[in-house]
Amino acid sequence: MSTLPNDSDYSFAVNLMQHLVVPTFVLDHEGRVLIWNKACERLTGIPASEVLGTKEHWRGFYDSPRPCLADLVVQNRVTEMAALYVSHDDANAQAFGVHAENWCVMPRLGSQLYLAIDAGPIYDDHGKLLAVVETLRDMSSHKRAQTELERMASHDGLTGVVNRRGFDDKLQQEWSRASREALPLALIMLDVDHFKRFNDSYGHQAGDECLKQIATTLTQALLRPFDVVARYGGEEFALILPSIDADGASKVAQRILDAVAALGIPHSGAEDGQHVTVSLGVAAATPHSGMSHEQLIQEADRALYHAKHTGRNRAVLHSSLPDRA
């Protein structure tokens, strides 16, 4: 039967933890650093001598003071995980510790890492908290690969904007949000005029380049980061404009018409025989108006159809159309 070294159990445990390959630090019941192991030094770039006996361990992970996961356990604040971490487990199931994940800026190293974090409490025989052990795993490569796969699944490979699947998901999300907050939601459907003629005249490679330029122009024409540009299919694009009414969406549509005209992409088969143009259908509604998000698409598409059949190179607002018979 093996025996412990002559040192006390505590000293042996501390020495063992110091040499673990897993980055680990330990806080006492007041939140001061008891152990900052060598793997944690390598992960953060901060030597143990700078943090032992202090509450400055946050400096290894963040630019400004904020609790680490172990702090939340020490302070009995694990219910705040949702506000501090991008992913976490159930705060109510913490008897044996908690798990969370977060992007950390790692100030000393000048890099950003996605860390999987576990924090477990240690109690004495009477249930009094003695310490909290926090371990960390660098999941950055896995997270970036996962993010890229998710981006590829929801974005168009040619233009880089959201694809049809991403559009459907985003429209549903924005419609739900508009419903909760009683806000308007606008949708613009856009079609590149006579695009088949363009491909026939200039070739598919030029057609692809045209679509990429249009997508970039649409993205630049939207002034808010939460607006969405999507390739709806072929030469058709769709724009989701949260919290914008019909008047505001019409102004965005006019800005797009001007921006596409400014591109000056030659098109001998265009309506004017000179440049690529686009047609736009604009629709806006509030979820409480009795319209569904599917009907919003139908109204924007109907307005687009009207724009294409009344001369192209224009924007038509759905509310300006005659009522259906």
Image (cartoon, rainbow, N blue to C red):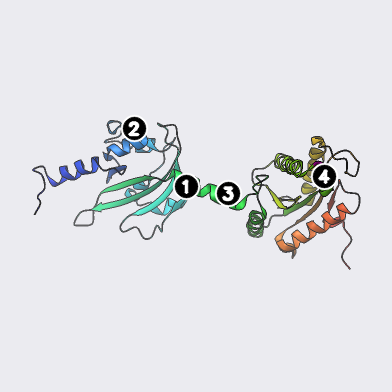
Residue 199 magenta: yes
**Most foreground residue, 297 or 217:** 217
Overall secondary structure of the magenta section: helix
Nearer to us of marks 1 and 4 is 4
Query: What residue is disc 2 on?
Result: 46
Looking at the image, do the residues carrying marks 1 and 3 touch, with CB atoms under 8 Å apart? no
**In the foreground, 153 or 136:** 153
The image quarter containing residue 201 is top right
Residue 230 image point, x, y percent? 69, 50
In the displayed structure image, the side of residue 258 where residue 58 appears, left or right: left
Residue receiving disc 1? 143
Give the quadrant of residue 224.
top right
Q: Amino acid at mark 1?
A: Lys
Which circle's residue, 2 or 4, is located before the other in the chain? 2
Q: Secondary structure at mark 1?
A: helix
Q: Secondary structure at mark 2?
A: loop
According to the picture, the residue beneath numbered tag 4 turns out to be 198
The magenta stretch is: 198-202
Position of residue 323 in the picture relative to residue 180 (left or right): right
Query: For this rendering, which residue is in front, 7 or 181?
Result: 7
